[in-house]
Structures are given as structure tokens and as C-alpha cells.
Image (cartoon, helix red, strand yellow):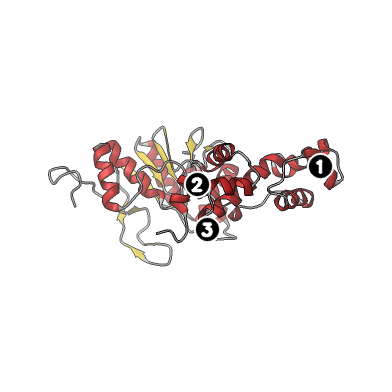
Amino acid sequence: MHVAGPDRAGYEVSIVSPRRRVAASGGAALAVSPLREVDVLVVPGFEFVPGLDVDAKLVALAPEIAAIRSHAAAGHTVVSICVGAFLLAEAGLLDRRRATTAWFLADELARRRPEADVRPEHLVVTDKGVTTTAAFSAMYDFALDLIRRHSGADVARTTARVALVDHARSSQTPYVDARLLPQPGNEFSRKVMRHLDQNLAARYDLAALADALRVSTRTLLRRFADATGQSPLEYLQSSRVRRARHLLETTDRTVASISTAVGYKDSGTFAALFAKHTGRRPRDYRATFRRGAD
């Protein structure tokens, strides 16, 4: 379907590589063309499996990284999809630029490239000719953004409808699952977390929490912050939101009932906190993520 009309020129797409043979993840062979100048170079990710030696992987991808660096130096646009941001970082393209990648890899990217301003909440980030995207489905968000910039908002909206893609997505925050992230902390901080999780709906009382852990409030705050980078209250709020997300996804309980269940008598306060953590109000979140909904 020619969404923009049959008289409008389409996009020419080709797969280019410094290698003669390229296999996709899973072993499928790809037909590639030699490197040449292109208006937009899109860099895919690589398979990021547990235990992967990222340094060795990037060394093995040295020809691709050199090609990316050369393309950018010539003044052309470079885009990465998901883990492709690690190749852009290795090429030096993310230094002093805002960038993003899949939310579960954002900390690793920031650790490896402290010169980059990593924004894990964003789906697509463009900074001075370099674009990075979140996990692989964010390629659709990038494609729509590209269409919007070159063909206008109406064509982008129509394309989204034809392709059954949400053209209004702007954040990956609602999709973050903290259970899949490495859990910071030590034995002491985990005791604090367990106590807070077991008393999720109770009023937050720092003095009582310190008494339960047999330390002073000052020691509690210092040791917990040193281990986790946050305060007990911040952890409690994120844990309450995590529980509320589960209830919104799996039950028909009202927002007010869920608010009470996670420790908030005022559902307005709860809704504001929930939106701060997820980017969506509770009812909007349920409409998107409700499991088994019609």
C-alpha cells in the first residue's frame, strides 16, 4: 500500500556490510552489498546472551565499528537499534550525546561509556545526527519518526494504523520489569527490602524500621543508600508501584481498592506516584497491559 500516494517516492533499503557473508541471529544468511554511502545508516544489535564477553564481541565487530565511525565522520546520519548502541558507543559517537538502549541494558551502556548521557526512559533519542532506540520493537518508533520527518505527521499516523503500531508511544518506562534487572545491595539492604515488602500497606515509619533492624535511623539511611543508591522510602514506593502494576494487570479490582492495598488511602496521591514511576495513570496502564482482557 502506498500510504503517501503512488506519486511519492519511497525509500530505497539495502543491507550493506564490510563483510562478504553475514548471518543473522539464529544463523540465517543475509544477502549483503558492499559498503557505500547511504543517507541513513541503521545499525542492528547483536545477540546479548547471559555471560557474553562484551569486550571480545566488540573486538570481533571492529570492521563494523570502523565503518560506523567513517560514515558518521562523513556527516551522514547514524541510527542504532537496541544493542546497536554499544557499537555506536565503541565508535565514539555517543560521547557528549544523549542516547538510549533497551532498559535492561542501559546501566551497562552507561557504565561502559560514562561520557554518554544515557536516557533509559526514552524510546528514541536523536542528538546531533545520531539516533539510538530502545529494544528491537522500538525500530517501529524510529521508522515512524523517520516517516514523520520526511513525509509529515499525517502519513506517519496512517502508516501506524495500517501497520497496527502505536504511533503515540514516547517512553519505555511502562515496560520496565524490575525483576529482570540486577538487584543491587548486600545482606543488610536485602533485610530492609524484605521488611518493607512484607509490610507493603503499612504506614512508612523510619524510626520503627530502624528499630526492627536494630540500628539508628542515620545508620539505616547511610547503609541502605551505600548499598542501593536510594532511600528506604524510594524503594518502598517502587515496590508498591510494582505490586500495583501486577494487580492492575491480573485483577478486576478498582484503582481505589488497589491504592489501599499498597498503602495509599488517597487514590489521587497513588495515581500521581504511579504515573511518576510508569509514565501512565493507573487506568491507562490497565487498558494497555491488562492480561486476558477482551
Identify the mark at residue 100; answer none if there is no mark: none
Residue that mark 3 sits on:
250
Label located before the other in sequence (2 or 1): 2
Tag of residue 208: 1
Tell me if residue 207 can be seen. yes
Identify the amino acid type marked 3: Thr
Identify the residue at image location x=81%, y=42%. 208
What is the distance, in whole Å, between disc 1 and disc 3 at their CAs?
33 Å
Residue toward you, 292 or 132: 292
Q: Looking at the picture, does residue 158 appear above or below residue 290?
A: above
Q: Residue at x 45, y 45 (%)?
A: 284
Please tell me how crowded label 2 is: few (under 14), some (14-19), or many (20+) other residues with Cα within 10 Å: some
For badge 2, the amino acid type reads Pro
Residue drawn 76% across and 48% down?
Answer: 192
Name the residue carrying label 2: 174
Tell me where residue 250 appears, x and y as whole percent.
52, 58
Q: Secondary structure at mark 2?
A: helix
